[in-house]
């Protein structure tokens, strides 16, 4: 069913890639939840800094609020990939797998370095953090996407 | 997997983009199949067979066992 929907209504990556068929609306539709997640994350951080008097439960709820739009972003990415033609779907899935593996590798390496005491008094002693994780995933995704696209060009 | 896609497409005087449009895939996919860097899924292979009105084994050559 997924395949037939992709065949009748294919979504090519050109729709959100600067070039011949770039569409700002398609770009916005795909990435809207990412922008919301970033905005909510900044808002949540600001609220937590200025409201130490809130209960622990409320602080916990505010702290994890950015995860909800992040999950919705993952859903829109999954739908976007599901609507692609089969080669592009394979390329995107390989890039996502590469990004996930690379990020897990970096996070694990940081954990090992931290337990060895190497990262004491550096910014990385508490792990990658929200921004660091996002940047690492993005870095490995772009690298994986470029490598896979080159292989099938 | 070896295939005769380029030859068959040229016989119909279609560009890669023309064939891609008929198949509902990207031109990159058609190119990757023609250059034998990508093996299509079974549904896509059947779609190719329908378009060229040939059995699948006349388009794709099975690798030796």
Image (cartoon, coloured by chain):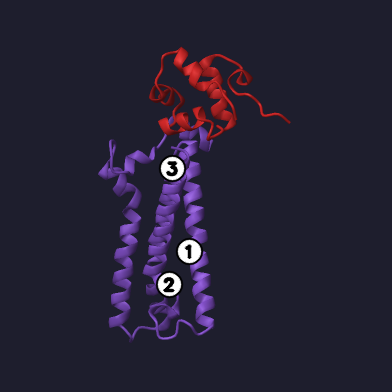
Chain colours: A purple, B red
What is the spatial separation of the Cα atoms under label 1 and label 3, in whole angstroms? 22 Å
The residue singled out by tag 2 in the image is A128
Instruction: Please name the residue shown 44% across and 79% down the image.
Output: A126
> Does B10 sit left or right of B60 as displayed?
left
The numbered mark, 1 or 2, whose residue comes first in the sequence reads: 1
> What is the number of the mark on residue B58?
none
Task: Tell which subunit mark 2 falls on.
Answer: A
Q: Residue at x 56, y 33 (%)?
A: B39
Q: Quadrant of residue A150?
A: top left
Q: Is residue A104 left or right of residue A65?
A: right
Between A5 and B11, the one nearer to me in the picture: B11
Instruction: Work out which quarter of the rendered image holds the C terminus of chain A and state it.
Output: top left
Decide which of tag 2 and tag 3 comes sooner along the chain: 2
Tell which of A44 and A110 is nearer to you: A110
Q: Which residue was labeled with disc 3? A: A150
Q: Quadrant of residue B62?
A: top right
Mark 2 → mark 3, Cα distance in angstroms: 30 Å
Are discs 2 and 3 both within one chain?
yes
**Marks 1 and 3 in Cβ contact (< 8 Å):** no
Q: How far across and down, in percent of the image, does residue A7 sit?
A: 47, 31
Mark 1 lies on a secondary structure that is helix
**Helix, strand or loop at mark 2:** loop
Where A49 falls versus A100 (above or below)?
Answer: below
Q: Residues within 10 Å of mark 3 (few under 14, many from 20)?
A: few
At x 51%, y 49%, the residue is A94
Tell me where residue B38 appears, x and y as whole percent: 53, 35
Q: Which mark is residue A103?
A: 1
- Crowding around mark 2 (Cα neighbors within 10 Å: few <14, some 14 to 19, many 20+) is some
Nearest to the eye among marks 2 and 3: give it.
Answer: 3
Which one is earlier in the sequence, the residue at label 1 or at label 3? 1
Q: Position of residue A37 (x, y in %)?
A: 34, 62
Say which quadrant the N terminus of chain A sits in: top right
């Amino acid at each position: 069913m997924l395949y037939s929907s992709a065949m009748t209504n294919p979504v090519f990556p050109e729709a959100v890639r600067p070039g011949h068929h770039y569409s700002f609306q398609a770009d916005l539709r795909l990435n809207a939840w990412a922008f919301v997640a970033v905005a909510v994350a900044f808002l949540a951080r600001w609220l937590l800094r200025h409201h130490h008097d809130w209960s622990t439960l409320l602080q916990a709820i505010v702290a994890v609020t950015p995860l909800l739009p992040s999950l919705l972003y993952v859903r829109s990415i999954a739908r976007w990939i599901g609507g692609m033609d089969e080669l592009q779907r394979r390329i995107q899935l390989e890039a996502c797998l590469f990004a996930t593996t690379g990020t897990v590798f970096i996070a694990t390496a940081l954990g090992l370095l931290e337990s060895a005491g190497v990262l004491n008094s550096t910014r990385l002693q508490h792990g990658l953090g929200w921004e660091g994780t996002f940047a690492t995933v993005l870095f490995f995704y772009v690298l994986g996407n470029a490598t896979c696209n080159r292989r099938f060009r | 997997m070896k295939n005769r896609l380029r030859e068959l497409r040229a016989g119909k005087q279609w560009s890669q983009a023309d064939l891609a449009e008929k198949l509902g895939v990207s031109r990159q996919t058609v190119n990757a199949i023609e250059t034998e860097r990508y093996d299509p899924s079974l549904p896509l292979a059947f779609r190719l067979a329908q378009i060229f009105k040939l059995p699948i084994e006349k388009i794709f050559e099975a690798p030796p066992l």
